């Protein structure tokens, strides 16, 4: 399977699977009150998606990651097409995020994250950004902003904003001058108040609720208040699987997706939360180590973008459940329920493992 390269870093498969199986029990707990047992619960569907994800990962290991350079623009163009198509789909929960194929739902924004990272790695690998200056970042920035704006149109604020740290981290690794990155970041902060008026009403409400959740405890502040109650009530050991009152009595919203970490905190306590955080942290550590050890610019940029994406998702989701950042639609990768997310993230982990196997390449 190594095709002449190093052996795969199997820890990058074991760690996601360990986190996945922890999350699986809590997904079952979160969906149990819908009247479903193990044989028909969301947990069973999640297992099927993970099996598909493992198959995708193993297929990814069969070919050197450099092959992705040949598929950059078909992937990017197909992603833009799907992001346009999804806007024409019927709204679900007030958003246009899914394309239904019978019993299967595809979320194009998950594919967008993969395609943007590959496109940025390809665009930046041959540019001498340190010498070319500010103008060299225009095309990579446009390649990021186009899908980001389409994702924000769905609307999906959380996923859209995830592309920004990915862009900045890859520009940094490509030796873009730090002062220009700080200028971009400062400019984004400066225009943020101007963009506030263009947000949806519920998005504005989320920001106001973040600043003061108690302003409307039974309305806009309900979700985050219940989430913090759930996490705080779990204590050190937790209340036990299927024993969490906030979860089982359905006080906690979006229990199996965005707020799955709150379920873990309530029923698994500090111990389960710490295990998840440490395991996710080890995945990030290995990802950045692969990026650091890879001499090839394409592989180094690719590994940096993938790891930054995964790290940003984890930090935002966990911080959101604890009230440290505004509530956004952000699943916790490998833990939250979601087929598109599982398959896309397993593909990304497969690419990381592939880069580690072929990191002696100078491409």
Image: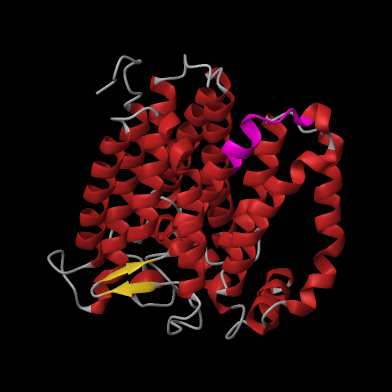
Whether 60 is drawn above or below 26: the answer is above
Where does residue 31 sit, x and y in percent of width and height? 28, 70
Whether 96 is drawn above or below 38: the answer is below
Q: Is residue 333 left or right of residue 37?
A: right
The one of 185 and 29 positioned closer to us in this rendering: 185
The one of 189 and 115 positioned closer to us in this rendering: 115
Tally of numbered discs: 0
Where does residue 89 sit, x and y in percent of width and height? 43, 81
Question: Residue at (19%, 60%) from the top-left corner?
Answer: 44
Q: Is residue 261 left or right of residue 160?
A: left
Where does residue 96 sit, x and y in percent of width and height? 48, 77
The one of 153 and 349 positioned closer to us in this rendering: 153
Where does residue 156 sit, x and y in percent of width and height? 56, 69
Question: Residue at (82%, 57%) from the top-left corner?
Answer: 189
**Is residue 278 something that shows in the picture?**
no
The one of 326 and 129 positioned closer to us in this rendering: 129
Q: Residue furthest left?
A: 39
Magenta part mainly helix, strand or loop? helix
Magenta segment boundaries in residue numbering: 120-129
The structure's colour scheme is secondary structure
Q: Is residue 199 magenta?
A: no
**Is residue 67 something that shows in the picture?**
yes
Question: Residue at (61%, 69%) from the top-left corner?
Answer: 152
Quarter containing the N terminus = top left
Question: Residue at (26%, 55%) from the top-left corner?
Answer: 49
Whether 99 is drawn above or below 14: the answer is below
């Amino acid at each position: 399977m190594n095709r002449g390269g190093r052996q795969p870093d199997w820890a990058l498969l074991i760690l996601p699977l360990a986190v996945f199986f922890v999350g699986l029990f809590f997904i079952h707990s979160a969906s149990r009150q819908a009247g479903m047992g193990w044989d028909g619960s969301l947990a069973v569907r999640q297992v099927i998606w993970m099996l598909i994800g493992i198959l995708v990962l193993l297929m990814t290991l069969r070919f050197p990651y450099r092959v992705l350079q040949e598929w950059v623009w078909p992937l990017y163009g197909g992603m833009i097409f799907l992001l346009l198509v999804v806007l024409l789909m019927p709204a679900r929960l007030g958003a246009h995020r899914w394309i239904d194929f019978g019993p299967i739902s595809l979320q194009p924004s998950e594919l967008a994250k993969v395609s943007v990272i590959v496109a940025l790695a390809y665009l930046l690998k041959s540019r001498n950004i340190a010498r070319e200056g500010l103008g060299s970042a225009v095309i990579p920035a446009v390649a990021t902003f186009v899908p980001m704006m389409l994702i924000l149109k769905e609307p999906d604020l959380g996923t859209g904003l995830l592309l920004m740290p990915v862009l900045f981290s890859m520009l940094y690794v490509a030796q873009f001058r730090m002062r220009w990155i700080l200028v971009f970041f400062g400019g984004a902060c400066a225009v943020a108040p101007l963009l506030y008026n263009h947000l949806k009403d519920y998005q504005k409400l989320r920001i106001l609720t973040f600043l003061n959740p108690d302003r409307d405890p039974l309305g806009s502040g309900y979700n985050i208040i219940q989430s913090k109650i759930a996490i705080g009530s779990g204590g050190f050991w937790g209340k036990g699987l299927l024993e969490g009152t906030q979860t089982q009595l359905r006080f906690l919203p979006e229990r199996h997706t965005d707020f799955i970490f709150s379920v873990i905190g309530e029923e698994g306590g500090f111990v389960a939360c710490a295990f998840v955080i440490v395991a996710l942290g080890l995945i990030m550590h290995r990802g950045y180590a692969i990026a650091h050890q890879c001499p090839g610019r394409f592989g180094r940029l690719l590994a940096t973008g993938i790891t930054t994406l995964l790290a940003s998702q984890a930090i935002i989701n966990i911080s959101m459940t604890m009230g440290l950042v505004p509530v956004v639609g952000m699943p916790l990768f490998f833990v939250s329920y979601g087929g598109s997310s599982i398959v896309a993230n397993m593909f990304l982990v497969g690419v990381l493992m592939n880069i580690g196997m072929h990191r002696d390449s100078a491409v």
